[in-house]
């Protein structure tokens, strides 16, 4: 008996319009940045038209990427609310691909922009085994102190013991597949942000992600017991916003590109792997074929490192971390990474190049800035 599970950051699956660009030029979309807009009302009209025009293509591609996962259960990040998810299923997944995920889970988390984690599931697997959601537990209200992960160094990140730990949530979903239990933990850790005070965004925000990772581990150990957790079926899915290695992109379009693997000295995700706690299933792929996001946003943000050209690298931000038992029961399971929805500006190694979905743009529209990941797991 098997179940196919996917995780996907769908990039701002939102119904509402964001008009903050009228007050803050830095938040204004580039297509309106050069326009002389005379009034707030004119700006609202233009912004609504822009969003509607751009989002239809993007959501078609998002739906195609989900369809290509072929998953029975899809863990999602950056979903505004349940109504938005239902509208996306009805207007895109169902109409375009005939897909139906009648079981849906969404709980409001802590994100100030309202982008939360969610889950949708079929009623049965491709093999005909019933999928039953038994219990949903949100941990969005847990503080650093509640889970015992606060330390004084976090004050430098403006965190206090009473501060809510998860930037979004750690959503715990108990399901039964053909009567056998599996627990999913859907997460979206703190983003890396921008550099400051001589530190890159990743360095500056890493202590918070490390605390989130330790908090997820504590939740699992509290649930199953520190000694017994290795023998239970659980899977951590989501955008964890950190990495152990990156594929550094060199060269240019004329002379050709190079792709050099580079190990990182530190990662905020280490608590999830220390002493064999969890198994990163995506790490089973070749070292140059684990990435789920293309980063090419400006110059090196760390002033102490000289630079003459933009930083470009391919990194794994999306994870499926299995319990030792689940990993052991699925030694041959190999996750698939769906890259057809990436923008054309993404620099891919030649052997990984794939046809993009129709109407994909150089930078946008695209399915998402992340790649969905899917894996088939035996539940034995």
Image (spheres, grey):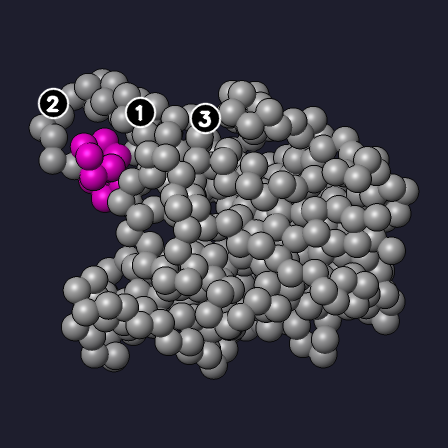
* Numbered tag placed on residue 15 in the rendering: 3
Q: Position of residue 232 (x, y in %)?
A: 84, 60
Q: Are the residues at dot 2 and dot 3 in contact (C-beta closer than 8 Å)? A: no
SS under mark 1: helix
Residue 258 placed where, x, y %? 31, 72
Q: Earlier in the sequence, mark 1 or mark 3?
A: 3
Asked if 200 appears above or below 189 in the picture, the reply is: below
Residue drawn at the location 51% of the way across and 64% of the way down: 290
Residue at left offset 51%, top offset 25%: 96
Name the side, left or right, on which 118 lies relative to 15: right
Q: Pointer 2: what residue?
A: 38
Q: Badge 2: how crowded within 10 Å, few (<14), some, or many (20+)?
A: few
Residue carrying label 1: 53
Mark positioned earlier in the residue sequence (2 or 3): 3
Please report the bounds of the magenta region as a residue range.
Answer: 21-32
For marks 2 and 1, the one nearer the N-term is 2
């Amino acid at each position: 008996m098997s179940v196919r599970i996917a995780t996907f950051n769908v990039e701002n699956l939102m119904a509402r319009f964001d008009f903050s660009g009228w007050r803050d030029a830095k938040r204004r979309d580039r297509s309106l940045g050069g326009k002389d807009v005379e009034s707030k009302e004119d700006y609202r009209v233009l912004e609504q038209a822009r969003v509607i025009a751009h989002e239809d293509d993007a959501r078609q591609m998002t739906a195609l990427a989900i369809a290509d996962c072929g998953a029975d259960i899809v863990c999602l990040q950056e979903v505004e609310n349940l109504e938005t998810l239902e509208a996306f299923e009805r207007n895109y997944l169902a109409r375009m691909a005939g897909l139906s995920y009648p079981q849906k889970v969404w709980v409001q988390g802590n994100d100030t922009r309202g982008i939360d984690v969610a889950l949708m599931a079929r009623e049965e697997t491709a093999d005909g085994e019933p999928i039953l959601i038994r219990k949903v537990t949100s941990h969005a209200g847990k503080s650093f102190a509640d889970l015992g992960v606060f330390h004084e160094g976090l004050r430098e990140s403006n965190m206090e013991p009473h501060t809510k730990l998860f930037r979004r949530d750690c959503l715990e979903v108990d399901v039964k597949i053909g009567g056998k239990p599996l627990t999913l933990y859907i997460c979206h850790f703190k983003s890396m942000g921008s550099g400051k005070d001589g530190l890159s965004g990743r360095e500056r925000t890493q202590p918070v992600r490390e605390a989130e990772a330790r908090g997820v581990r504590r939740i699992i150990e509290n649930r199953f017991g520190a000694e017994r957790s290795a023998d239970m079926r659980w899977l951590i899915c989501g955008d964890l916003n950190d990495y152990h290695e990156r594929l550094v992109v060199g060269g240019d379009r004329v002379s050709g590109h190079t792709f050099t693997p580079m190990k990182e000295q530190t990662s905020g995700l280490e608590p999830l792997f220390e002493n064999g706690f969890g198994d990163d299933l995506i790490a089973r792929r070749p070292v140059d074929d684990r990435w789920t996001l293309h980063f090419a946003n400006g110059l090196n943000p760390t002033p102490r490192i000289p630079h003459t050209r933009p930083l470009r690298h391919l990194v794994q931000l999306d994870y499926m971390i299995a319990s030792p038992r689940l990993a052991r029961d699925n030694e041959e399971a190999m996750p698939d990474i769906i890259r057809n929805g990436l923008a054309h500006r993404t620099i891919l190694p030649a052997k990984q190049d794939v046809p993009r979905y129709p109407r994909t743009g150089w930078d946008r529209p695209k399915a998402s800035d992340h790649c969905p990941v899917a894996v088939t797991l035996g539940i034995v």
